[in-house]
């Protein structure tokens, strides 16, 4: 009996998305890429959700590209390679712009495209024994598709050091360069993730979505930051959610979305 390569479950307004190819270290192939994109398109449109947790089954978060998928790419033309890369890029972009906060639960390793997955998550929490790496140059290729997301996360200086060497690095270094936000013992991973989910649930659902969108817009159009931010705060202050949140604060009570 075959098992789904991507497992999705929802509990208490939180979606759990699990890469489910543990026999190949949850490596990417064309099917998994397509499944991830479809999943995050659907979850992003689900207004009942408060957060999405992304994790990997077995011993590894994501080991990068599947060896059989890479072998097949040897037979692709230049044009076919371009199409293949664009499909993967759109998958990362779909996760990146998902209106729901996406939390990465990282253990084992996040290599190549797996490290790219970490970069497109809003909050990344890793076990202290996890390994990271942009290892593509070791195979004579490069981390091109993930580069816009990774460079935005860790900056040009760290990208130059890590893209060009292809070296593996520790969770501690990943935290220091901003790829992950928190490093904990493996046995404390779920507790740390749950704490972040609780923090998210204490905020306004729409306020969080608009905050995420505003970050992207200000980053993309810094010259328009004053107009973008003025419009965003005015819209949220006058919305039912903004009105409720402000009234709850002034009346020293919890807002209705925490009930």
Image (tube, rainbow, N blue to C red):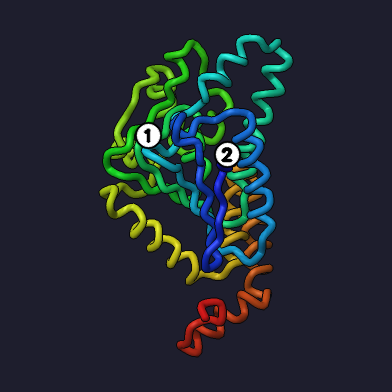
Residue 66 position within the rendered picture, expressed as x and y whole percent measured from the top left: 52, 24
If the image is split into quadrants, where does the N terminus sit? Answer: top right
Between the C-alphas of marks 1 and 2, the distance is 25 Å
Residue at x-position 58% and y-position 42% = 4
In this orientation, does residue 222 appear? no
- Toward the viewer: 38 or 237? 38
Residue 198 vertical position relative to residue 226 in the rendered view, above or below: below
Label 2 Cα neighbours within 10 Å, binned few <14 / some 14-19 / many ≥20: few
Q: Which residue is mark 2?
A: 2
- Toward the viewer: 130 or 203? 130
Looking at the rendered structure, the secondary structure element under dot 1 is strand
Residue at x-position 52% and y-position 81% = 259
Residue 121 position within the rendered picture, expressed as x and y whole percent measured from the top left: 50, 46
In this orientation, does residue 39 appear? yes
Q: Is residue 223 left or right of residue 126?
A: right
Residue at x-position 39% and y-position 24% = 162
Q: Residue at the far bottom: name it.
A: 251
Residue 256 vertical position relative to residue 173 in the rendered view, above or below: below
- Toward the viewer: 42 or 169? 42
Closer to the N terminus: mark 1 or mark 2?
Answer: 2
- Toward the viewer: 222 or 119? 119
Residue at x-position 64% and y-position 24% = 85
Q: Which residue is mark 1?
A: 109
Displayed quadrant of residue 191 = bottom left
Looking at the rendered structure, the secondary structure element under dot 2 is loop
Circles 1 and 2 in contact, beta carbons < 8 Å = no
Residue 214 position within the rendered picture, expressed as x and y whole percent measured from the top left: 61, 54
The number of numbered badges drawn on the structure is 2
Q: Residue at the far front: name it.
A: 1
Residue 81 vertical position relative to residue 234 in the rendered view, above or below: above
Residue 192 position within the rendered picture, expressed as x and y whole percent measured from the top left: 35, 57
């Amino acid at each position: 009996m075959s098992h789904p390569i991507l497992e999705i479950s929802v509990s208490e307004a939180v979606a759990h998305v699990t890469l489910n190819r543990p026999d190949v270290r949850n490596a990417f192939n064309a099917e998994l890429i397509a499944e991830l994109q479809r999943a995050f398109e659907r979850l992003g449109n689900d207004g009942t959700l408060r957060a999405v947790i992304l994790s990997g089954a077995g011993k590894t978060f994501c080991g990068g590209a599947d060896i059989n998928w890479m072998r097949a790419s040897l037979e692709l033309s230049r044009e076919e390679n371009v199409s293949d890369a664009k499909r993967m890029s759109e998958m990362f972009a779909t996760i990146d712009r998902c209106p729901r906060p996406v939390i990465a639960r990282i253990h084992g390793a996040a290599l190549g495209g797996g490290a790219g997955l970490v970069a497109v998550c809003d909050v990344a929490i890793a076990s202290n024994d996890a390994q990271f790496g942009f290892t593509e140059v070791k195979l004579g290729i490069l981390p091109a598709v993930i580069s816009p997301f990774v460079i935005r996360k860790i900056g040009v200086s760290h990208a130059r050091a890590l893209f060009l060497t292809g070296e593996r690095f520790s969770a501690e270094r990943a935290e220091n360069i901003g790829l992950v936000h928190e490093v904990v013992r493996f046995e404390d991973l779920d507790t740390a993730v749950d704490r972040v989910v609780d923090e998210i649930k204490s905020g306004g659902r729409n306020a969080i979505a608009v905050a995420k969108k505003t970050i992207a817009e200000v980053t993309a159009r810094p010259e328009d930051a004053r107009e973008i931010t003025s419009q965003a705060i005015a819209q949220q202050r006058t919305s039912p959610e903004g009105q409720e949140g402000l009234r709850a604060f002034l009346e020293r009570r919890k807002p209705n979305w925490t009930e």
